[in-house]
Image (spheres, helix red, strand yellow):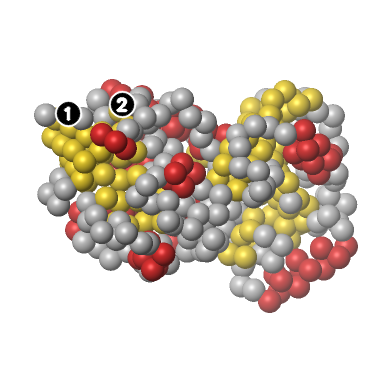
């Protein structure tokens, strides 16, 4: 019998970062990851941005989580000897005069000076982008190469014998008051970090997920040299020389993993409105985001099984939220630290029935 402190199910952003922090706390961890399933983490744009939306909403807890994530990812890059954290900042060219006036009014009303500045029209500044009206420049923004980071995590877990490429069989999972049993494994606790697949988990299928399908495109764009993320409702990320990712769509009524012609046409048409260079689409990817109705994470333990937990629901801001809330989850698990009510799944206990 193999004895563990934790079984973690899922090796996406949430599962990887939480498992890593538990291992650094000298806990015995084993990750179960079903490699046959498609994942949203592997196709995510990985954007982090402190100011979002048409009303310039400040990201929840931005002043806390953004410095925290920077320290975490830069340290992780050094340990893994990799480069997946890109602080490139973000430029939002004004689409029209009405939008320009709207954003200027909002910047006057809100104290966003730590993150935003107005950029006057300057064709030479972003030569491949239509910006005749200028735009908004956002600092503390960028993107994480999620696929590369997760690949690094997988190697780390495999090297330390903390990884098992296996789908968890719920019929083999036995939960008692004192421990978790699974085949030849005994653990103190189990944590589900399955992303969208938690909607099919018999222990947590009562939680009100609001999953959204998203599609992105990979394009060949010769001569594109802008490091900043360009965002005009749809965005461009420069991945490497001559290669960009375009995104992204939000679809709530067709939750599958198949790329669609309609999304290809939509993204292409939106990008073409502000990208002046010719491009060629080379691939298209789809994923299902584990978004939530209140846009807050799902963290905590099952209402009746005190040793069964969930760490999920990070949604579109997963790369920003995961480092900070994995640390919060670690404190909750190991030192009885109280989770903030906005993230604790106790807020939904009334939905659970035996």
Quadrant where the C terminus is found in the figure: bottom left
Q: Residue at x 76, y 50 (%)?
A: 232
Occupied quadrant, residue 126 = top right
Decide: is 25 above or below 54: above
Decide: is 9 above or below 99: above
In the image, 27: left or right of 36?
A: left
On the image, the x and y values in percent for residue 223 come to 77, 27
Q: Which mark is residue 184?
A: 1
Task: Rate crowding at label 2 as few (under 14), some (14 to 19) or many (20 or more) other CA atoms within 10 Å.
Answer: some
On the image, the x and y values in percent for residue 277 come to 84, 32
Q: Which mark is residue 263?
A: none
Q: Residue at x 21, y 61 (%)?
A: 336
Disc 2 from disc 1: Cα separation: 13 Å
Decide: is 338 above or below 138: below
Residue at the bottom extreme? 109
Which element is circle 2 on?
Answer: strand
Residues 104 and 12: in front is 12
Decide: is 5 above or below 352: above
Which element is circle 1 on?
Answer: loop
Whether residue 282 is visible to the viewer of this picture, yes or no, is: yes
Residues 301 and 67: in front is 301
State the residue position of label 2: 164
Closer to the chain start, of discs 2 and 1, is: 2
Quadrant where the N terminus is found in the figure: top left
2 and 1 marks in contact (CB < 8 Å): no
On the image, the x and y values in percent for residue 49 come to 58, 53
Q: Residue at x 28, y 23 (%)?
A: 159
In the image, 6: left or right of 321?
A: left
Q: How many marks?
A: 2
On the image, the x and y values in percent for residue 175 come to 20, 45
């Amino acid at each position: 019998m193999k004895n563990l402190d934790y079984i973690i199910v899922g090796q996406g952003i949430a599962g990887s970062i939480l498992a890593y922090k538990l291992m650094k706390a000298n806990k015995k961890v084993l990750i179960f990851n079903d490699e046959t399933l498609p994942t949203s983490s592997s196709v995510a744009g990985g954007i982090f941005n402190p100011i979002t939306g048409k009303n310039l909403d400040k990201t929840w807890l931005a002043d806390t989580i953004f410095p925290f994530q920077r320290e975490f990812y830069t340290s992780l890059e050094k340990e893994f000897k990799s480069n997946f954290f890109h602080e490139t900042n973000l430029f939002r060219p004004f689409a029209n005069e009405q939008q320009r006036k709207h954003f200027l009014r909002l910047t006057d009303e809100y104290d966003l000076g730590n993150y935003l500045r107005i950029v006057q029209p300057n064709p030479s500044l972003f030569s491949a982008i239509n910006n005749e009206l200028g735009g908004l420049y956002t600092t503390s923004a960028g993107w994480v190469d999620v696929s590369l980071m997760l690949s690094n995590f997988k190697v780390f877990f495999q090297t330390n014998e903390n990884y098992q490429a296996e789908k968890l069989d719920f019929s083999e999972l036995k939960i008692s008051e004192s421990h978790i049993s699974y085949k030849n494994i005994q653990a103190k606790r189990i944590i589900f970090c399955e992303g969208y697949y938690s909607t099919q988990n018999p222990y947590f299928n009562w939680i009100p997920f609001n999953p959204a399908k998203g599609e992105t495109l990979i394009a060949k764009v010769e001569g594109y040299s802008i490091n900043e993320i360009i965002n005009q409702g749809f965005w461009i990320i420069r991945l490497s020389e001559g290669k960009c990712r375009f995104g992204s769509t939000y679809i709530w009524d067709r939750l599958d993993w198949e790329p669609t012609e309609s999304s290809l046409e939509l993204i292409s048409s939106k990008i073409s409105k502000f990208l002046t260079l010719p491009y060629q689409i080379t691939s298209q990817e789809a994923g299902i985001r584990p978004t939530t109705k209140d846009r807050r994470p799902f963290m905590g333990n099952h209402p009746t099984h005190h040793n069964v937990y969930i760490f999920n629901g990070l949604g579109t801001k997963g790369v920003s939220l995961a480092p900070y809330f994995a640390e919060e989850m670690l404190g909750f698990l190991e030192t009885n630290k109280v989770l903030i009510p906005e993230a604790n799944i106790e807020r939904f206990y009334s939905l659970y029935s035996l």
